[in-house]
Structures are given as structure tokens and as C-alpha cells.
Amino acid sequence: MTSEATDFGDSAHRAESQNLAEEAATWFVRMREPKVAEHERQRFRCWLAASERHQREYASFEKLWGALDGLSRPKPRKKRMAGSAMALVAAVALAFAYSTAHVDEQKYTKIGEVQQVTLADGSIVTIDAGTSLHVEYSLWQRRITLERGQALFRVAPGVRPFEVRAGKGTLRDIGTTFNVLEDQGKVSVSVEEGAVEISLDSASRKLLLNGGQQATYGADEISAAKAISPQTVEAWLGNRWVFEDASLGEIARQINRQHERSVSLSDASLDNYRVSGVFERTDRAGLLKALGAILPIRAEETAEGTRLRRR
């Protein structure tokens, strides 16, 4: 099941957040005026006390203003613009940047559901079934944490770095389209075009992947880059699984993200079997039949699901 392209997150929630940012920006400008009437100060105090969200939003503007103000301080001039005009211009710019840059959202897809979402910066993420990811955008960076599952990223250009956290490593985009699959700590990265830099939390070694290359990594090791056909990066969007030396357990987990009826291994040692081939994602029965033909296993149907056993 595939969902149509949609804005990331609930549109009503986004509109509410943007309105709140604009209110906070307006009060921020007013409170920086050289002379503020007492009744205005009272209105501001009431607005601020109305909710913790108001307080957090206003505090965010104070923090951001301080950070931006510290980046570059102009030399004093004999003739300066009126303070209120300068504050208004800067605050409006700050409000726009904050409302469009600040994102903190979680996204899940159900079994068998594929969803395409457009992020605040125009980047497009296609999220595979049974996937969980977290998006964090700030004025300084764009970061997505792929907690489990698979996603294809088409990254929009921008000044802020675009990073994907997956497993025990970080992927830094260098203007590209790439796919990431996280499976119980093992991460596979495939680049269709552009380049991606992989760096592990536990080691200083890094690996640069270019278009048409793939690599995998775990907690302590990155594989060497290997050449792949760029078309295989998006194979799953065409309802195909491309397995290359995949363990039987990995294949079972892929099936379970795509189909409601689960597949499990009766014996952990069955995970030692490796499989390579191209299979239809929608044809669960066909894949199980093929596995039984190429491996010494059989599928046993139970009330809970399908158990793979040795023949």
C-alpha cells in the first residue's frame, strides 16, 4: 500500500506552530522598543503566562537572537537606523527562518505501507514499510534518525548540513540521492547519484561513497565500497527485493515489514544460510517457495504465522 505525497506532519499542527512563532516574534519586537507603555507590558506578561508553550517559544527567540547577534557585530556608525526598524526587520527574518527551519517530528509506517513525504526544506523521503524515523531541523542543521527500516532520500540543496543517523554511524550528504536500510544494527547505504560520507561513532575512519556504490557497516567496521547498478537503489520502489548474500533472518525480517503474516526461524542456526536473488515483494508465497527450493528448509504454517524449519 502506497500513500500519496504529503507534507511531513500534520498541517494543522504546523500552522499552529507557525502562528505561535509569529506571535512570539511580534512581542519580541515590541519588548525591544526603547519606550514601551505599561499597558503593553501588562499584555505581554499575560500572553507569556498563558501557557508554557508561549514561554518556550519566546525563550527560543531570545536564544536565537543572542546567537545571531554574536555572529557579527557591525562597527558603530555616527548615524544609525532607528532601533525599532532594525529590530523589526531582524525579528521578521528570524521569525521566518525559525518557523520554516524548526522541525521536530516522528514518522512511522505500518506493515505494507510505503509513504512519500516532503520535508520543510524541499527534500523528499520515501519511507518503506515498518519504518520509524525522527526528523530534527534547526537553523544550524538538518538531521534525520532512521531508527529502523528503510528510506530513500532525495536531498534538496541547502547551506545547512544534511545528516542521517542510522545504527552506530552518521551519513553526511554531499548533494545526492541515496538509500539507507537499518536491520538490527547492520546498516546498508546505497548511493544513486552524488556522494555520501559514512563515519562511525567508535572509529575515526570514514568512507566516501559515490554514485553507483554501496557499503555496509556495523558498530565497529565499515565494509569496502562496491560497485552497484544505480537502478538497484530504488528497486524496492518497483516492488522488488534485491538480495545479495542476505541471511535467512534478514529476509524473514524484510518479509515481516511488508506482510501481515509473520515469518520466523525455528532454529537460530538457520540464519547462517545466505541467499542472493531478485524477488517480488508482493509475492510472499512465491518467495517462500523459492527459499524452500534453494535451501534445505520447509515452511510450516501455524496459527501465529509461518515457521521455517530444516527439512
Image (cartoon, rainbow, N blue to C red):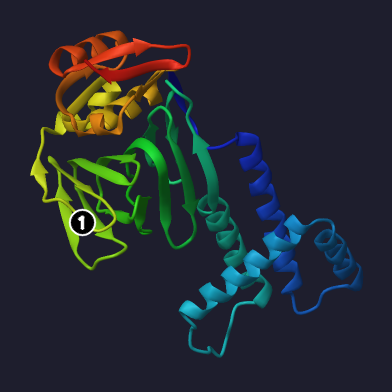
Residue beneath label 1, please? 221
The residue lying at 20 percent from left, 13 percent from top is 292
Instruction: Inspect the image, locate mark 1, and give the three-letter code of the amino acid beneath it.
Output: Glu
Horizontal arrangement in the rendering, residue 228 relative to residue 8 (left or right): left
Q: Nearer the viewer, residue 226 or 118?
A: 226
The quadrant in which the C terminus is found is top left
Q: What x and y, as percent, mark residue 83?
A: 66, 77
Horizontal arrangement in the rendering, residue 298 relative to residue 150 (left or right): left
Q: What x and y, as percent, mark residue 192?
A: 19, 38
Identify the image quadrant of residue 34.
bottom right
The residue lying at 15 percent from left, 12 percent from top is 293
The residue lying at 48 percent from left, 26 percent from top is 110
3 to 60, vertically: above or below: above
The quadrant in which the N terminus is found is top left
Q: What x and y, as percent, mark residue 79?
A: 57, 86
Identify the image quadrant of residue 298.
top left
